[in-house]
Amino acid sequence: MAHPVPSNEQTVLLEALRSQLRLGQQAMADWDGGPLAVSAVPGAGKSTGMAAAAAIAIARNQLHSRHQLLLVTFTRSAAANLKGRVRNHLRDLTLPGNSFSVQTLHGLALTIATRNPELSGLSLETLTLLNLAQNHRLIRTCVEQWIVAQPQTYQRLLEGQSFDGEETERLRRQSVLRTEILPSLATTTIHEAKSSGLMPADLAALGETITRALVPEQGDYDVLTIAADLYERYQLLLQQRQLIDYDDMILAALKVLVDPEAQRFWRSRIFAIFEDEAQDSSPLQTQLLEVLAADPEHPDLPLNLVRVGDPNQAINATFTPADPVFFNQFCDRAQRHDRLITLDQAGRSNGTIMAAANRLLQWVNTSGIAGKERPFRTQAIRPVPPNDPQPDANPAALGQGVEIHTPDTVTDTVKAIAQRIIQLCNSDATLSLAILVRDHRQGRFISELLSDPETLGVDILTTGLRVLDVGAQSRQTHVPSEMLAILRFIARPHSPDRLKETLQVLVKRQRLPPQDLNALAHAPEQFLYPGPLDLPPQTEAAQQARRLCVGLLRSRLELPPYHLVPFIGLTLGYNQSELATADKLASRLAQQTRADNTLRAMIEALQEIVGTERFEAVDTEDRDDLYTRSGQLTILTMHKAKGLDWDVVFLPFLHARLIPGELWVPPQQKFLGEISLPEVARVQIRAETHGEHKSAPIPDALTAWQQAQDLKTAEEFRLLYVAMTRAKRLLWMSAAQQAPFSWSKPENLHEAEPCPVLPVLANAL
């Protein structure tokens, strides 16, 4: 690739930036066009290398605002972090910051689609993004329509494997099908098929192929045929109600790029694409990037596409269509053309922790525990050389580096963790610590015990350690419920109950001192607007309450409904993250009440949000800093821990029931047999999108169910691998001899088998 030559001063600065990188990162920085795959082990600094490589590519090619480098990632927080790193490098290189763009995949797709509404058929002025509550209603409607339209197939599902015709059992099965099985089948297959580029007709054709290939047998229910019908009805309802979902954004962008002129326009603006976390891409998302990464003048030339990821940290396949097989295939193709870089030097952890992670990878791949699935790409984590530019790389171990325990009970496990924390903090109060759990209910169990030192017999707070229970924060944001309480008061200020709810919110938010709220709320009119014969509030606290409440009421007269939510947020003294969440909520309400922009309509929409879904808060703080502060113990799930690290990581409750666990069918659904229809459909769609049917037929229901178990096993061990590699100086692992059968009832203890890899790791120490 021919490119302008940087000035002598820039050349010196570029070489200085390159010299700060590790060997593999330097290979990324030397990229000079064409496709490149970068497979990185945990702690190898792939984001650091990507940011530096991006800045160097911008400088060497003298990019500008009309011909940019596009960096793509999956989350807004990751995009913001990457953008900040590249911008800092460009500032050091004295280059303008408009030569690159960082976007999420869905944000990129939406930009392309809405800029060309005549081609995409997507305009945010006429279409609304589907929210969670609307999706549930749409799915329920699809199910009801399908039941009416397909009575014979529905009857076959009702009969299941056996049925004696008893009316009570019929009613029970009807309820399970309508509210559990069919909605879950629709949700799973629609997202899986749509994000893979399969339309309802494609899914129906695949179902017919399976039906023709199979000998009719008990347990096969023409799953994909049912799913295709549900999918088609879902698409029709989206069109009728002028709604779009996230997959529609990608499809709309691809629809735009079919047009030669539009394709040329977008390609001419993009010099190259760098993709982070590439192991989490779906087929449709990958297709979008490949279309954009082609040379506008020479589309037959190799793509200017750099994909960076770690297939061994692919932990989202159980709830998204992402699958590491796609990135692995890209890496394999790149390797055949000498276009693969493996970042295998990692400075995060000490040698003992890296050895344990490598042993896990090796044992899982060779044990056959995941059937025909190969959970991991073969790449061992290696330490960095002594002269590594990263400070404190491969830090010294605390204790043995890796400690494995088998306490008697789960309560004993928490007590042992607390005792180890006290030992560690007494030696070094600046340590960062985390307890990573597989199930959020485990986190709640630990948090409750640690906050009850009398029961536990140990008090970690005596060390001065802060405890952050992430699950408690994310279980439900308080913003929608607080807004609902105050908007109800604004709509009905004469109601004592509504006034009291508002006063309670103001006290909770520390806008008012605690006081007898009943005395204030029993006569709202006299309290809010006292007449000549009414005694005004006597205490300063009561007068302050009156002023705040009157100000809230006045806002209804002075502000349009859309502005009430942010105004209330300011009145309640929300912090930056809470105000951002309030703005998000206001935008959502404005969309839902566009046809009826009244306070009454806002309250109805808000009631539905509070009652039927968990509204996700916006976090404007530095997430890494919030979770990984020194002198803090963070309790969170293994999934949320990805991308973070701590000096000390505790992994309790490593039992075989959860890792790898087993797919199971709830008792109420077993009339269909020992299979789950959504999981069967997902595996069958996967076989089609991966091209596995070319070497073997699409699996029948029973075979697909077994493959689903293997896929789950593979992902659970990747999740454990991610959790283990979060630790820098000490990894503490345990499996109690007695544990709950279900964490919804942690007091019911039973003999529990440890995760099968735990004895392997213990023997290797």
Image: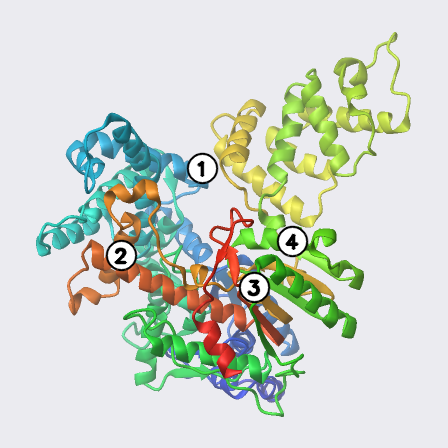
**Dot 4 amino acid type:** Ser
- In terms of sequence position, does the residue under pointer 4 or pointer 1 come before the other? 1
Task: Say if 210 sits above or below 39 in the image.
Answer: above
**Dot 3 amino acid type:** Pro
- In terms of sequence position, does the residue under pointer 1 or pointer 3 come before the other? 1
Q: Which residue is mark 2?
A: 705
Q: Which residue is mark 1?
A: 133
Q: Which residue is mark 3?
A: 652
**Label 4 – label 2 distance at C-alpha:** 36 Å
Quick one: label 1, few (<14), some, or many (20+) residues within 10 Å? some
- In terms of sequence position, does the residue under pointer 2 or pointer 3 come before the other? 3
SS under mark 4: helix
Quadrant containing the N terminus in the rendered view: bottom left
Task: Say if 339 sits above or below 106 in the image.
Answer: below
**Label 2 – label 1 distance at C-alpha:** 30 Å
- Residue 144 appears in the picture as rendered: no
**Label 2 – label 3 distance at C-alpha:** 30 Å
**Dot 2 amino acid type:** Trp
**Label 4 – label 1 distance at C-alpha:** 31 Å
- Give how far across and how far down residue 204 sits, in percent: 18, 48
**Label 3 – label 4 distance at C-alpha:** 13 Å
SS under mark 2: helix
